[in-house]
Amino acid sequence: MRGRIIKESIDLFDKKGFSKTSIQDIVDTIGVTKGTFYYYFKSKQELLMDIHQNYIKELLKEQEVILNDEYISCKEKMNRLIHLIIKNIKVHGKSARVFNREVRHLDETQVLLVNKYRKDFRFNLEKLMEEGIERGEFRNHLRSDIVIFGILGMVNRSYNWYNPDGKVSEEELVSIYMDLILNGIKADTNSQ
């Protein structure tokens, strides 16, 4: 039942927003009483925190698998990590939107914990960037922290507009992002 409450709440939070979704809305959707809700969660805010933690912890586990693959280059790891985020739009799109949009409804302690996980994800990317610089795969005059903020800003905003069932495939979007990251938008003067 806990999983069902979480799933239906994600749908409601995605459609109506956290503040406009009541506990009554959640239990009415599932067909249970408020007592059932309170058996699993002390509050709607605790439920939101659970949604946030489940989402980011799963993302961190998947990130770790990619980062620990010693048989692929840093460029390929970056490609796979960007693909991981884009893939999650289709697989966990509603959770991702709730994660990115509704964090403002968590209390200060909860935000600190969620931000710790977010920082872990970001720092892992910074370490990958620095490793790629050391190996000569990435330019060495760039600040890895700023580059990663830029990459995450670009890729994470995809949740707001990207339609995985639309004209652009996940692979094409990742390819465009990787081309922008690795080559920028500067025209190739050799081909002119």
Image: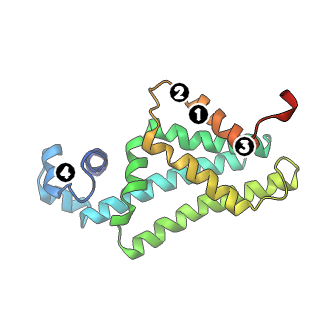
Judged from the image, the secondary structure of the residue bearing numbered disc 3 is loop
The amino acid at mark 3 is Gly
The amino acid at mark 1 is Leu
Say which residue label 4 marks: 26
**In the image: residue 163, left or right of residue 6:** right
Q: Residues within 10 Å of mark 4 (few under 14, many from 20)?
A: many
Q: Between tags 3 and 4, which lies in front?
A: 3
Q: Is residue 50 above or below residue 91?
A: below
Say which residue label 3 marks: 184
The mark nearer the N terminus, 4 or 2, is 4
Q: At x 19% / y 51%, what residue is drawn?
A: 26
The mark nearer the N terminus, 3 or 1, is 1
Say which residue label 2 marks: 168
Q: At x 50% / y 43%, what residue is drawn?
A: 158
Say which residue label 1 marks: 173
- Mark 3 and mark 4: Cα distance apart in space: 45 Å
Q: At x 37% / y 44%, what residue is drawn?
A: 94
- Mark 3 and mark 1: Cα distance apart in space: 15 Å
Q: Between tags 4 and 1, which lies in front?
A: 1
- Mark 4 and mark 2: Cα distance apart in space: 34 Å
Q: Residue 186's spot in the image, x, y percent? A: 75, 41
